[in-house]
Image (spheres, grey):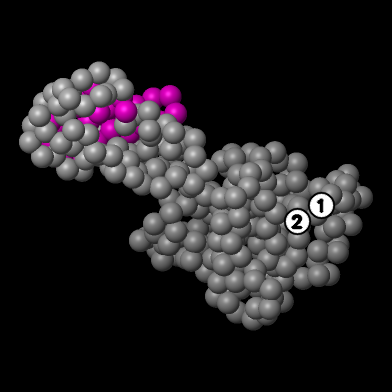
């Protein structure tokens, strides 16, 4: 398996890893500069030459995988018999610099409803390294032509056309996914809220909507859904940055994206599901 495929496999599994690269070589060494090794928690792919270099690099890579906020680092190895080595002697005679680059598990976001606000939000989030799931019941909003604005995305885009029950997608999302509910149909939104609260492992849950809409939803989630107050409080209103009151789709999207990015930052300092604020919905959107 190539190192590119190995990195893709770790990402698809949502597992952290480290990309190890021979960055510099002076004199004789087992591999040339550019040789790569991908290290996961229990597996490795590729090689930077074996022996002490590779064993030490793997050990250090797994220490980085277990760290809360790892950074890239460069390790230098002198390959001679005068150096005390942890995993045996390598006396090729050269000096090798090995770069370790952490491959963290990226954030995942699911936008339920790719209408005016949803698409604007997708355009912003697509510029970030994350897994972005776009879910809608309407095929006309998920056409290649309409989603063409995401063609140069940094994010990995996953499009879900679910004609009948979009809430079924919730169980397919990666653990920790932040769910944003903003469909064209309030009944659909209500069903998604109920299903999201019943789905273990989700990250934050956001609902776009007015105070009146949320009051109706909250009553229904309690009386019909059987959710207690603490559970319902995982969904809050409004989403977005407090004080930004504009109702243009692009304005709402910028506000919601900024608030979500702040939630990502908080994820780096705590574990478990996070609560994301839910947003005030402009009357013209739905």
Total tally of numbered discs in the picture: 2
**Mark 2: few/some/many CA within 10 Å (<14, 14-19, 20+):** many
Residue occupying image coordinates x 75% and y 56%:
235
Give the left or right position of residue 141, taking residue 92 as reference: right
User: Between 32 and 83, which is closer to the camera in this rendering?
Assistant: 83
Quadrant housing the N terminus: top left
User: Between 63 and 132, which is closer to the camera in this rendering?
Assistant: 63
Quarter assignment of residue 210: bottom right
Is the residue 192 above or below the residue 153 in the image?
A: above
Quarter assignment of residue 174: top right
Which region of the structure is painted magenta? 29-56
Residue 12 on image: x %, y %: 44, 38
Say what secondary structure mark 2 lies in: loop
Contact check, label 2 and label 1, Cβ < 8 Å? yes
Residue 232, label in figure = 1
Is the residue 7 above or below the residue 126 in the image?
A: above
């Amino acid at each position: 398996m190539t190192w590119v495929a190995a990195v893709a496999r770790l990402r698809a599994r949502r597992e952290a890893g480290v990309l190890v690269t021979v960055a510099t070589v002076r004199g004789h060494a087992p591999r040339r500069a550019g040789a790569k090794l991908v290290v996961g928690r229990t597996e490795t792919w590729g090689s930077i030459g074996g022996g002490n270099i590779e064993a030490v690099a793997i050990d250090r890579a797994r220490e980085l995988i277990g760290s809360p906020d790892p950074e890239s680092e460069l390790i230098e190895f002198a390959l001679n018999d005068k150096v005390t080595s942890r995993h045996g002697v390598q006396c090729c005679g050269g000096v090798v610099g090995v770069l370790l680059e952490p491959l963290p598990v990226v954030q995942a976001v699911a936008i339920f409803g790719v209408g005016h606000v949803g698409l604007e939000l997708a355009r912003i989030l697509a510029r970030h390294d994350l897994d972005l799931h776009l879910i809608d019941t309407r095929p006309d909003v998920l056409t290649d032509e309409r989603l063409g604005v995401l063609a140069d995305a940094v994010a990995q885009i996953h499009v879900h056309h679910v004609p009948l029950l979009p809430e079924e997608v919730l169980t397919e999302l990666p653990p920790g996914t932040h769910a944003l509910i903003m469909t064209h149909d309030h009944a659909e939104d209500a069903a998604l809220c109920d299903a999201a609260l019943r789905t273990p492992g989700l990250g934050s849950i956001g609902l776009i909507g007015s105070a009146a809409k949320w009051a109706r939803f909250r009553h229904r989630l309690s009386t019909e859904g059987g959710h207690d107050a603490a559970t319902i409080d995982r969904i809050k209103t409004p989403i977005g940055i407090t004080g930004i009151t504009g109702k243009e789709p692009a304005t709402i999207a910028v506000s919601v994206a900024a608030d979500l990015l702040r939630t990502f930052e908080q994820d780096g300092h705590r574990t478990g599901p996070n609560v994301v604020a839910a947003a005030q919905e402009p009357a013209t959107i739905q």
